[in-house]
Amino acid sequence: MKIFISADIEGVCGVTAWDETESDKASYARFQQQMTREVCAACEGALAGGATEIYVRDAHHSARNLIAEELPRQVKLVRGWSRHPYMMMQELDSSFVAAMMIGYHSLAGGGGNPLSHTMTSRASEISINGRPVSEFLMNSQTAWLEGVPVVFLSGDEEICGLAKELIPGIETVAVKSGLGASTVNLHPLSALEQIKKGAQKAMQGDLAACRMPLPEKFETTITYVSHQDAYKASFYPEARRLSSRTIGFDTDDYFEVLRLFLFNL
């Protein structure tokens, strides 16, 4: 069985401040290591649950974070940004039986992580059909576009709760919670144990129960921090300016929403 894993860092156990996510900062290396270990734990759980091939999409910042030689040999690692609209889900297609997400975090405007955001710090809020958009929601709908169920998520407590609302059958592991500029974290080794166990349980569960239907239409809004970004984005084809900081975009094709995000976030 072929599995896809998308990995971020802001939802990794212990990560609390931006300098811990930036490769040119002294504090980055230890959290790069934890990110790699959490991905390894998910891979080990997936393999124990029956996976035979795993694609791992490094999806944080430069997309060159994971320490490749520490990953299981069954892994193919996707590094760097091709600028395909699938972005954090690049290389996903209908040949995969399931997708997992590691190190995911609270959405733009959320309070569950000191590093809450959706794709970029330029947007203060994104919504589709009135629902606030997290990277989890965005990427889950990409998976559903390919008919792939999203069966496991690890990250902060808030994103795990939102994931359960969206996909009731999903397995989740909350490795931390956030309050203001602080986090409360599991012991890093406990996080690894729970991620491995959760990924294995997800693989041995009803995968099809996590394959959700896409909406028939997508009414998308992006509210920017800066009115200048909204003005520029309003010239994107079919986009319209709703207020000084907000644009709207309607379509019945989710790929067009992803294209909007690629060029305007």
Image (tube, rainbow, N blue to C red):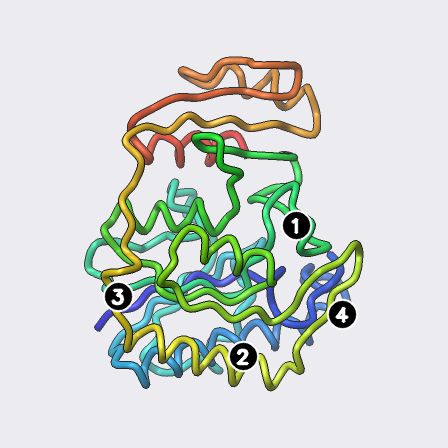
> 40 or 100: which is nearer to us?
100
Q: Quadrant of the C terminus?
A: top right
Front disc: 1 or 2:
1
Instruction: Point out residue 166 in the picture as x, y percentages from the top left corner.
Output: 42, 50
Give the Cα distance between marks 4 and 2.
17 Å
Q: Amino acid at mark 1?
A: Ser
Q: Amino acid at mark 3?
A: Leu
Q: Does the CB distance between marks 1 and 2 fall below 8 Å? A: no
Question: To which residue does mark 2 refer?
Answer: 37
Looking at the image, residue 191 lies above or below residue 2:
below
Front disc: 3 or 2:
3
Q: Amino acid at mark 4?
A: Ser
Circle 3 Cα neighbour tier, 10 Å, few/some/many (<14 / 14–19 / ≥20): some
Front disc: 4 or 2:
2
> 74 or 226: which is nearer to us?
226
Query: Quick one: SS at disc 1?
Result: loop
Looking at the image, residue 180 lies above or below residue 256:
below
Front disc: 1 or 4:
1
Looking at the image, residue 214 lies above or below residue 195:
above
Question: To which residue does mark 3 refer?
Answer: 207
Question: To which residue does mark 1 refer?
Answer: 116
Q: Does the CB distance between marks 4 and 2 fall below 8 Å? A: no
Question: To which residue does mark 4 refer?
Answer: 27
Front disc: 3 or 4:
3
Residue under the point 65% across and 20% down: 245
Instruction: Point out residue 38 in the picture as x, y percentages from the top left corner.
Output: 52, 76
Which numbered disc flags the more N-terminal residue, 3 or 2? 2
Q: Does the CB distance between marks 3 and 1 fall below 8 Å? A: no
Left or right placement of residue 23 versus residue 209 in this view: right
